[in-house]
Amino acid sequence: MALRRNAAARSIGSALAAGLGLMRVSFARGSRWRQEELMLELLKQLALMTEEIHRANLIQHYRLTTDQLDRASDDSALADASSTLDGLSEVKRRQMMYANRQFGALVLAHRVGALDWDQLLGHLRVLCRNSVFAEYWDRTVEHRRSLPAESVDAKVGSVVDVMLEELAEDPDEWWVVGSVPEPPAHE
């Protein structure tokens, strides 16, 4: 973890050092046009670094969440504290937590750019064929009602709803279930 932070800090530091070096050269020459061009390039680089930091924060948040789920899976007292699903055996609760984790990993992969929209839909189609996931999805419908409609999670959730409905109607056509709406804008 510290190694990743140090690598990120070095790359950010290197980018800033390079940018400052270019600025010094540009300002020394006195070219107004070159200065504006350089500032635009620095702004682009800053925007890219900001996006990368956002993706790194999403990944770190997911790691923290999965660490908590791992601990809860290993300790029934923690599972009782972290689960809002009642009336489940210990085995069933672990399955529900794992289904949540699988779904979360797919959504995270899409949000950080590892899966494009079509790839995400393909993985979700396969996941929806799993009866444990379908049960998890049914049991957690109330959890999703509070999501802002414009959020990535809500939009992906509505796609999963359609997939599961269509799968129930015709399970033999699982690879084509779920209409393909426009991908949501990344948060």
Image (cartoon, rainbow, N blue to C red):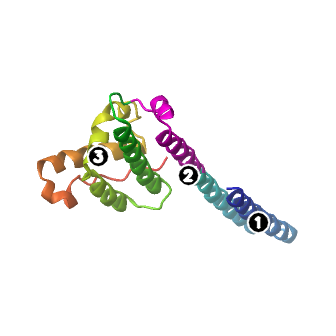
Lower position in the chain sequence, tag 2 or tag 1: 1
- Of badges 2 and 1, nearer the viewer stands 2
The residue tagged 3 is 132
In percent of the image, x 33 and y 53: which residue is there?
182
In percent of the image, x 82 and y 68: which residue is there?
21
Across and down, in percent, residue 73 comes to 47, 42
Across and down, in percent, residue 23 comes to 80, 65
Amino acid type shown at disc 1: Ser
Amino acid type shown at disc 2: Ile
Q: Quadrant of residue 43?
A: bottom right
On the rendered image, what quadrant is the N terminus found in? bottom right
Crowd band around label 1 with a 10 angstrom C-alpha radius: few (<14), some (14–19), many (20+): few
- Of badges 2 and 3, nearer the viewer stands 3
Residues in magenta? 57-84
Q: Nearer the viewer, residue 167 or 54?
A: 167
Residue 59 - label: 2
In percent of the image, x 72 and y 60: which residue is there?
12
Give the CA distance from mark 2 to mark 3: 25 Å
The residue tagged 1 is 14
CB under 8 Å between discs 2 and 3: no
Across and down, in percent, residue 17 comes to 80, 65
